[in-house]
Image (cartoon, rainbow, N blue to C red):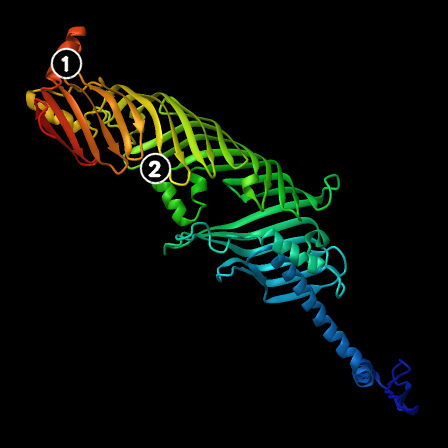
Amino acid sequence: MRSGAFVFGLIATGSEAGSWSDARLAGCVIRIRANPVELGVKKILVLLGVVFSLLIVGVVAAAAIWFLAPGKVRQWVEGETRLLDYLGSQVVGIANTYLVPELSYETIRYDPPFTLAMGGVRLTAPDTTRVLDLGQMTVILAERPRMNEPIRIASLELSNGAVNLIHDPELGGFRGLSPLVEPTDERERTTAEKPEFSLSNVLVLNKIVIRGIDLVYDAGDGSAPMRLDALAADLDIVPATDAGEGWYELKLASGRRPGLELDLDGRINIDSFDLVLNRVDATALLDDRTATTLPPQLAALINQHQIRGAMEARITGRIPLMDPDRAEVDLQASLDRGNAVFGEYRIPIQKLDLRADMASGVIGLRSLRIDSLGGRLTAEGRLGLDGDATVSWTIADMDLRELLASRPADQPPRLAGRLASTGRARAPTASPLEGLSGAGEINLTEGRLVNIPVFSDLMRVAQVTGLRAPSENRDSFQSPFTLTPEGIRLDGFDFRTPALAARGTGTIGFDGTLNISANGGPLEAVQNRLGPLGGIIGRVTDQLVTYRIRGTTAEPRVSVQPLGIGG
């Protein structure tokens, strides 16, 4: 037997009953006369011999490799570990070059040739806010990875996680997301030192898939967070070869059905972060069915106020993500069958159409049309992000009775009237009330105002003369007004009922305070029926009975000044 060789064999010949068989064991031949039972045992022994032989050969081979070439085994194991560490550091380095929150992970697995699976992935802001939690991030490489060479990423899949939006009540915005992206000079410095972290050198993306990602909103006031679960998105990405280096075509389908869908068609430059929106279409439906799919807190609020409606919007334009103030965007939006209830009042919106744009840091409200309460509101304006905001409006023929959430058929409405108004306003965006200015006019006809504070108190005081408020809707109120930092100044209002007429001036403060003087009563009512002669009498009788209205809009106080004496 040769040196170093190990041989074990069991060979049987012959198959007939009672035949003789030869068996060789370590080079010796043994003759065996076998009967049928012995033949079955012989077959089992043959099988065991083969298995045992293979086992010993495997052990001997492994031992030989380990003892004769141990460096190669250790090199293979350690090389795999170094490759995993390298791939992980590449992914982390790329993300942290561009994002302020830092990327980390707990586990990593490489499935050759192109799949890298990372578990326990997190984005953590400098203030320790955890912005993103992912159960798994799967990176599909465009080519087989090599040590010390930039990786090339073909697609990403983010699954089983949550995006955390935590409101900062002191600073505003969301914690950990202001800012989100590293400053341009910092990114350029890092990518100059490490070109392998430059997105244009790394990404050959063609798809990003999002599955099972929850959106968690925390108001930051100690209340329970709201969670919108199971968001999904498919983003197809194709290099835009006709647009230059770094440009990619984007096609996104996202949302949460039923009720919320988003489709995007655009381009992005992964070096400059310029975003071009050829089309972004968003639809949202809020009805009895979709409301039940929302987070409990939000669903309760929506059901409490009976908020309903179908919204559609389209956005086009260009947005430099690193300098959003230079964005140029157009917005078209509509709302159908809208409704909301607040206490005793409801706001029904049959139709809303909005056209707006943004350019050079100025948001323009090109047109706003709202069909509601049987009438229409139209408006236009502009908002300078670092300057003033202006708006002008027209309201025509809105029926205030439609504002009442409930209207018993056997009782006159608590509120009635047809409203019309025109006006304009201007205010600085930094401190709107401090620099507020504007003017307009309000006109209410076919009204029932006797149940409204101030008007009801004025009627109550006037009724000491025996006046009675009629049940029909024949009240009216008309006044020019001026907007001031303190409130709304009524510049000569005229309030009339079939039994009472009053006119006056005053201010309704934005804090609810009242400071109004009104001349009125039965003499005023007579004066209005006398035409030109009444005007002559009015100049005398105006000084006879003056009503002073003080207090607040919630608790007004009306006093009488006979002969205009007192304050």
User: Is the C terminus in the top left, top right, bottom left or bottom right quadrant?
Assistant: top left
The amino acid on which the numbered mark 1 sits, given as a three-letter code, is Gly
- Residue 438 in the image, given as x and y percentages of width and height: 35, 28
Residue at mark 2:
433
Q: Residue at x 30, y 22 (%)?
A: 442
| As drawn, 460 above or below 204 | above
- Residue 35 in the image, given as x and y percentages of width and height: 84, 85
Horizontal side of 165 relative to 242 (left or right) equals left
Question: Which SS class for mark 1?
Answer: helix
Question: Which SS class for mark 2?
Answer: loop
The amino acid on which the numbered mark 2 sits, given as a three-letter code, is Leu
Residue at mark 1:
538
For residue 206, the mark is none
- Residue 391 in the image, given as x and y percentages of width and height: 42, 28
Tell which circle, 1 or 2, labels the residue nearer the N-terminal end. Answer: 2
Confirm or deny contact between disc 1 and disc 2 (CB under 8 A). no
The image quadrant of residue 95 is bottom right
Horizontal side of 319 relative to 19 (left or right) equals left
Task: Tell me how far mark 1 sits from mark 2, CA to CA.
Answer: 37 Å
Q: Residue at x 26, y 38 (%)?
A: 511
The image quadrant of residue 541 is top left
| As drawn, 80 above or below 50 | above
